[in-house]
Amino acid sequence: MPFELPPLPYAHDALEPYLDARTMRLHHEKHHAGYVKKLNTAVSGTEWSTSSLEEMLRRLDEIPEAIRQAVRNNGGGHFNHSLFWTCMALPAEGGGEEPTGELAEEIERAFGSFSDFQQGFGEIGMKVFGAGWVWLCLTPDQDLAVVTTANQDTCFMPRELGGYGRGSIPLLGLDLWEHAYYLKHKNHRAGYINDWWNVVNWAQVSTNLQRVRGSQSLLTV
Ligand code: MN3
């Protein structure tokens, strides 16, 4: 099978008390695993089975209609979750520490300050109706922006298929599906967002920015 579920980079309970172990296990072993399984079913035996995940999502408009929606939903789900896990860390390993260096400077330039960025990101996340994601993304003009996508769409999908085009690269994403928080936070998305800031791995987000600037792919899934 071309795609595999990447292991979580920490134990299921590592992000307690902010993200609970039961949610993390279900989210990774059921939801994310389901996207990988269905993606493999969709692409196996097609000419796309040897393409990288990022390439497939960038060129979603070229994928045969018979499998396009399955690739959109499940390929997007596989990419989004693979990035999501790596953008978190336990507080003892740097989770929740503020960004530094070039990334910190760019956040200040784009949003005024880190706390202004956090506030704006949270407000935009609160406005997403139904299931989707909120992203810190690098635009084709090389600016930082906060954007949202519906369902499992991701930033660099074609515009007509829910994204912002191939030059828009997500650096950090927050899953706003209820499966990401309902067991612990119930209907309180704001509480989930506030808790999540305590485990954001800004060192990884900096690495993501460097990788994108160096024209490297974000993930090796
Ligand atoms: Mn999810």
Image (cartoon, helix red, strand yellow):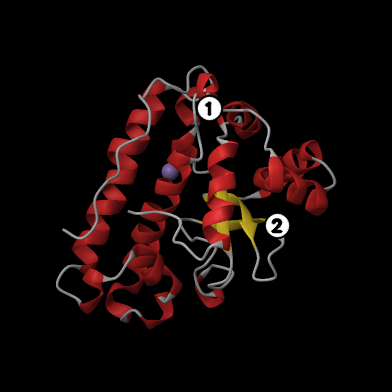
> Position of 138 compared to 40: left or right?
right
Q: Position of residue 170 (x, y in %)?
A: 56, 56
Please name whichever residue, 111 or 21, is drawn nearer the observer in this view of the structure: 111
Extreme residue toward the right, this view: 112
Q: Is residue 175 visible?
A: no
CB of mark 1 near ligand 1 (< 8 Å): no
Where 130 sits versus 61, above or below? above
Q: Which residue is mark 1?
A: 186
- What residue lies at 33% left-to-right and 32% top-to-bottom? 26
Identify the element where label 1 is drawn. Answer: loop
Q: Position of residue 61 (x, y in %)?
A: 42, 80
> Position of 209 compared to 59: left or right?
right
Q: Position of residue 102 (x, y in %)?
A: 70, 48
Where 103 sits versus 16, above or below? below
Between label 2 and label 1, give the one nearer the viewer: 2
Instruction: Classify the position of the N terminus by image quarter.
Output: bottom left
What's the mark number on residue 42?
none
Q: Is residue 16 visible?
A: yes
Identify the element where label 2 is drawn. Answer: strand
- What residue lies at 72% left-to-right and 62% top-to-bottom? 143
What's the mark number on residue 145?
2
Q: Position of residue 42 (x, y in %)?
A: 23, 66
Under mark 1, the amino acid is Lys
Decide which of tag 2 and tag 1 comes sooner along the chain.
Answer: 2
To which quarter of the image does residue 54 belong?
bottom left
